[in-house]
Image: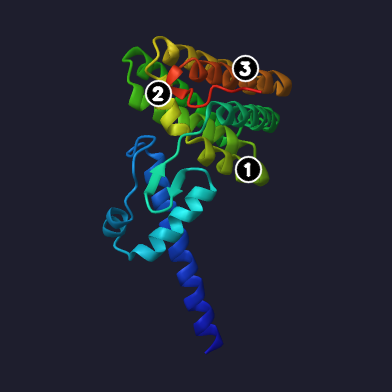
Amino acid sequence: MQEAVENLTKDASDSEGALLDRVRNLVLSGRFPPGAPVSEVLLAQEFEVSRTPIRETLKQLQHEGLVEIRPKVGTFVREPTRREIVELFQLKECLEGMAAGLLARRGPVPELEILERNVEESDQAAAHQDAARYAELVHEFHRTLILGSDNSKLVEHYDRLMNQLAYHRLVLRTAEHPGRITSSTAEHRAVLAMIRAKDHFGAEAAMRNHVYASSRELLSDARTASDHTLS
């Protein structure tokens, strides 16, 4: 009997976690633009659940900084303020720089082959100015780099950071800037060259420079300036 109760509790927990992941991915996908309302009713219909688990899921997403719940008004997609973007990119620079350095120390590992294929496909996306494909490849490059660090704690903190940053939406935005796709691909190549050379410090520096360049490109976009105060 006790085992049956424990199994039911585990199944319920797994179900809640799966729903949270699915709704989070939906919000991060860009389907709902910043400021757009997120309907409990529509989500309940789409995921074929009652409104109660949807409501609890949205509370968790508010805690993560992805949505804003306004009492008696509704739930809306939240966009990070300019200051938050600066602070989150500073953390991103540290984590991804560390990951590049750790990967460089590991030598020939499967992640290197993925990165090499990635930059080749990125060149093609740049040649065709394919922003959507570019955004997919950027996600793969950075994710592969993080996993290639072989550091589970780094991965854990990185995932939390990327959720708060809603990074996919930001990449799609900067991909529209003239020349950014080409520049970003060149920066990826520089990182990969340092990793291939097993240059720990060079790889970390190249990755930090890339993340910093991305943040400056993003912050040059006036649409991010929902908060003009940097202190």
Residue located at (60% from left, 32% from top): 88
Residue 192 visible, this angle: no
User: Quick one: label 3 or label 1, which is nearer the N terminus?
Assistant: 1
Element type at mark 1: helix
In the image shown, does 147 or 66 lie closer to the viewer?
Answer: 66
Other residues around mark 1 within 10 Å, as few (<14) / some (14–19) / many (≥20): few
Whether pointer 3 and pointer 1 mark residues with C-beta atoms closer than 8 Å, the reply is: no
- Foreground residue among 137 and 81: 81
Q: Residue 209: which disc?
A: 3
Q: The C terminus is located in which quarter?
A: top right
| Farthest residue, direction bottom | 1
Q: Nearer the viewer, mark 2 or mark 3?
A: 2
Q: Earlier in the sequence, mark 2 or mark 1?
A: 1
Q: Residue at x 45, y 17 (%)?
A: 221
| Mark 2 residue type | Arg
- Quarter location, residue 52: bottom left
* Image-quadrant location for residue 202: top right
Residue drawn at the location 46% of the way across and 70% of the way down: 12
Q: Which mark is residue 173?
A: 2
Q: Which amino acid lies under the numbered mark 1 shown in the image of this protein? A: His
In 3D space, how far apart are the residues under numbered discs 2 and 1 (Cα atoms)? Answer: 24 Å
Work out whether residue 116 or residue 26 is closer to the camera in this orientation and state it: 26
Q: Which residue does the numbered mark 1 point to in the structure image? A: 157
In terms of secondary structure, where does tag 3 sit? helix
Binning the other alpha carbons within 10 Å of mark 2 as few (below 14), some (14 to 19) or many (20 upward) gives some
Name which residue type carries label 3: Asn
Task: Farthest residue to the right: give it.
Answer: 201
Residue 84 sits in quarter = top right
- Secondary structure under tag 2 reads helix
* Image coords of residue 1 (percent x, y): 52, 90
